[in-house]
Amino acid sequence: MNMKGLIQSPSCSSSPSSSSSAFLRPPCRAYASRNSKFPVLFPQAICTSQRIHRCSGPSKNYIDARFSSGWSETKSLFSKKSLKKYLIPLGALVTSKTQDVSNAPIVGDDKIGVLLLNLGGPETLEDVQPFLFNLFADPDIIRLPRLFRFLQKPLAQFISVLRAPKSKEGYASIGGGSPLRRITDAQAKELMKFLWEKNVPAKVYVGMRYWHPFTEEAIEQIKRDGITKLVVLPLYPQFSISTSGSSLRLLESIFREDEYLVNMQHTVIPSWYQREGYIKAMADLIEKELRNFDFSEQVMIFFSAHGVPLAYVEEAGDPYKAEMEECVDLIIEELEKRKINNAYTLAYQSRVGPVEWLKPYTDETIIELGQKGVKRLLAVPISFVSEHIETLEEIDVEYKELALKSGIEKWGRVPALGCEPTFISDLADAVIESLPYVGAMAVSNLEARQSLVPLGSVEELLAAYDSQRRELPAPVTVWEWGWTKSAETWNGRAAMLAVLVLLVLEVTTGEGFLHQWGILPLFR
Ligand SMILES: C=CC1=C(C)c2cc3[nH]c(cc4nc(cc5[nH]c(cc1n2)c(C)c5CCC(=O)O)C(CCC(=O)O)=C4C)c(C)c3C=C
Ligand SMILES: [Fe+2]
């Protein structure tokens, strides 16, 4: 079959892992979620086919865990009203008959596509500033109050120019650019291979949020190929408004404006950290890396996740923290099954700007552990499945140095999953399991309504998790001031306030240093 035109990057070497049917669970009883008024029934068919890790009892299922812990306590946007909506995904309903313009694989009458969503990264040092501009221009990264929205682009320009030298240094130290495109392309190629081997001939596309290949480019290709059923799969294991959410929001706006896409059936797999293949693959990597230590049972397993500003979780109901904690629990459970009972901890890295981010912070935790006499540390990057600047530079260089200075004697790091066959094979299973829900009309489709991983259309998912689209303090604060805990915070806030004043003056008068430097106006 013709696969030309698809991803042609260096592939990961892998061989298909053994069938994941070993992961099938015993039939699950139907039960209701503990803190919710809405009973969530999990029929056997769904439980087994979704291969959700926790399927053993009322207190240990995925949805139940969400609503019984952080979610309900954090003014979650999964209010009972939105939860109801969430559990009744409507799907994209209209079947489109498209012209057969390409060699896209066909199942029945359908041409199936999988769209992998990822962040994207600068490929050269010249790309760094424009990449940062795209990132900071994203209203899901810097959420300005409505009144200040017109400042989004000038502010993004300003911050990106300011941050570029530091970022460039980082990218220079890892070879002059991000490896993200190469790795994501390789993952796409492997995923396609697994899908075909599992008798699902699908095309896999990569759509990046902030750099090439942009999501818009992937969508154009999807249209050219005449895809009729699309599975949208963000490559972030845990959902965050700032990552998968942002990509889905972009997708929603693209879908809305396009007649072809309005009619294309699709579904979204919003997060998949609880899948057994992913959990086992992570545990495999940890187990392997522990073997490099002497006295391996004394090694502290240090999960380091990318942070998000605290307000995302506490004010907008971002499920990221709850999903992260659940994910760590699942990996630890898997390790314990293997008789690996090491101490472990979770901390958050990579904060940007002066607002408060999820705590504990990775750097502070490393210092504390050193003070407490921990001698062996194994860092586990957990929020991202490729190597990238924050593993290769921040963890491997900065945190390692800090750890050694803080009294840690032996440091190790688990590699990112990349193209691990167990992992990619399981992603292929996730795609296959989602296919019956593509375009499913949940109102009349009991299974879609009861799906454990709440598959739904882009629009429904966005409406469910972020319907109110609250204004949040941006990671880089531009309007807050006051007495703060540290001089760094205060300096940052004062500087940003000054920036805001200058920007307002620039934009209203049309004069100032940004105009002199040719940065403004953005569009001539
Ligand atoms: C789950 C992963 C990620 C979350 C959550 C996330 C939130 C987030 N990030 C920024 C700001 C920056 N991120 C940058 C790079 C970057 N971010 C992620 C992942 C998550 N970000 C990755 C994988 C990468 C690296 C891509 C690569 O090129 O390898 C950067 C640029 C690098 C730098 O200058 O440090 C910035 C800036 C914010 C503000 C945020 C939440 C609001
Ligand atoms: Fe980031």
Image: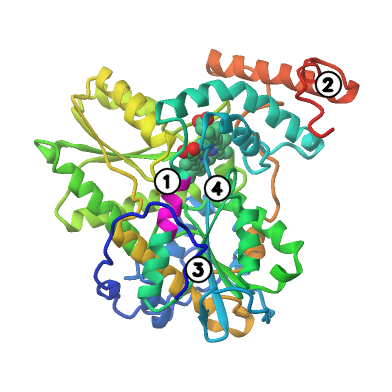
| Relative to 420, residue 19 above or below | below
Q: In the image, is the residue at mark 4 within 8 Å of ligand 1 by its beta carbon?
A: yes
Rendered image: mark on residue 243:
4
Rendered image: mark on residue 506:
2
Residue 349 in magenta? no
Please indicate whether residue 451 sits to the left or right of residue 225 in the image. Answer: left
* Three-letter code for the amino acid on which mark 1 is drawn: Ser
Count residues near mark 3 (Cα–Cα under 10 Å), then give few for <14, some for 14-19, many for 20+. Answer: many
Residue 448: horizontal and vertical position, in percent?
54, 77
| Cα–Cα gap, marks 3 and 2 | 48 Å
| Cα–Cα gap, marks 1 and 4 | 10 Å
Mark in front: 1 vs 3:
3
Image point (44%, 74%), residue name: 432
* Three-letter code for the amino acid on which mark 4 is drawn: Thr
Nearer to me, 389 or 226? 226
Nearer to me, 178 or 492? 178
Residue 415: horizontal and vertical position, in percent?
30, 43
- Marks 3 and 2 in Cβ contact (< 8 Å): no
Region rendered in magenta? 181-188
The answer, for residue 243, to whether it is visible in the render is yes
Rendered image: mark on residue 203:
3
- Location of mark 1 (residue): 383
Image point (61%, 54%), residue name: 215
Q: In the image, is the residue at mark 3 within 8 Å of ligand 1 by its beta carbon?
A: no
Please indicate whether residue 325 sits to the left or right of residue 21 in the image. Answer: right
The answer, for residue 310, to whether it is visible in the render is no
Residue 53: horizontal and vertical position, in percent?
34, 65
